Amino acid sequence: MTTWFVTGASRGLGRAIAVAALERGDLVAATARSLDALRDLADRFGDAVVPLALDVTDAAAARDAVAAAHARLGRLDVVVNNAGYGLFGYVEELDPRLLRDQLDVNLFGALHVTQAALPLLRAQGSGHIVQVSSSSGVAAWPGLGGYHASKWALEGLSDALAQEVARFGVAVTLVEPGPVDTAWRGASAVHATPLPAYDDARAAAWHPPGASTPQAVAAVVLAVVDAPAPPLRILVGDLAADAVIPMTQARLDAWRAWEGLGRSADGDDPGRVEN
């Protein structure tokens, strides 16, 4: 039996992960900003679920919630940092306050929960931190610069974290879904005030033809958690793989194309160019 701590469990992917874990007999501490959003989980699963109110932007509240979950469950095996939302707007349109708020939830929220959980995971000599990132954490598209900033930052933080905590028996996985059928683009999204200069780009913007279901992504998360050697990163969904892998190859090609000039900075002739 696995014990879970899942943030953002009121709906969407966080809810799907919590339900999938509970349905197979695991124990889950499920958090949301409001306890009312978790009452149906408690009604359905009883003592197997520990509902906790948590605003992940509050570091002290994150410490209290993690401590309460650990006290109720006896241990924490998997910590899922899922709480987050989408910020839409071209970079010129972004009010810095919107970007700070985005980072406060998507990046610092994950940091607060991770820092609260790590002493417990280190003490027990095991654990798995699952960071719900995005294909937008390793690729970028117009109109999502603020969201990309939060997820690319989460990727770098978590990559370093994985190297730091492996010696304590703690694994880290970045889950990188493509579009998921949640409220991310709808009710939970924040939109910058539009500038007319970008109206034509907005009108011509490509919208993905489909999306993974939260339940399908949750199944991937459970399989990763159960794996004896879980990956640091996993792209989830056809659209994620189809977009990110070619973009990554193009990035490698560009580095190679300009490698000679870049390496010349360490040579005797700064003007030397080799391709």
Image (cartoon, rainbow, N blue to C red):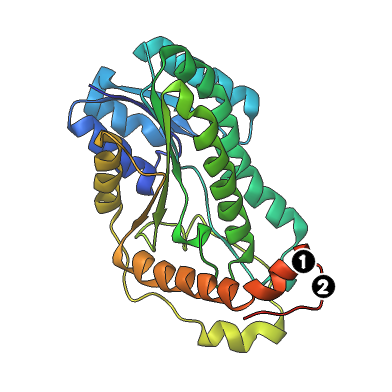
Position of residue 7 relative to residue 193, above or below, is above
Q: Quadrant of residue 240?
A: bottom left
How far separated are the C-alphas under marks 1 and 2? 6 Å
What residue is drawn where x is 76% and y is 62%?
Answer: 266
SS at badge 2: loop
What residue is drawn where x is 50% and y is 75%?
Answer: 250
Residue 267's tag is 1
Position of residue 235 relative to residue 243, above or below, is above
Please state which amino acid type lies under the numbered disc 1: Gly
Q: Quadrant of residue 236?
A: bottom left
Q: Is residue 120 visible?
A: yes
SS at badge 1: loop
Judged left or right of residue 191, residue 177 is left
On the image, numbered disc 2 is attached to which residue?
270
Near-viewer residue (232 or 81): 232
Near-viewer residue (224 or 54): 224
Q: In what quadrant of the picture does the N terminus appear?
A: top left
Q: Quadrant of residue 27?
A: top left
Q: How many marks?
A: 2
Instruction: Say if mark 1 contacts mark 2, CB within 8 Å.
Output: yes
Q: Position of residue 222 (x, y in %)?
A: 26, 39
Judged left or right of residue 59, residue 207 is left
Looking at this view, name the residue that lies furthest to the left.
24
Judged left or right of residue 125, residue 136 is right
Q: Residues within 10 Å of mark 1 (few under 14, many from 20)?
A: few
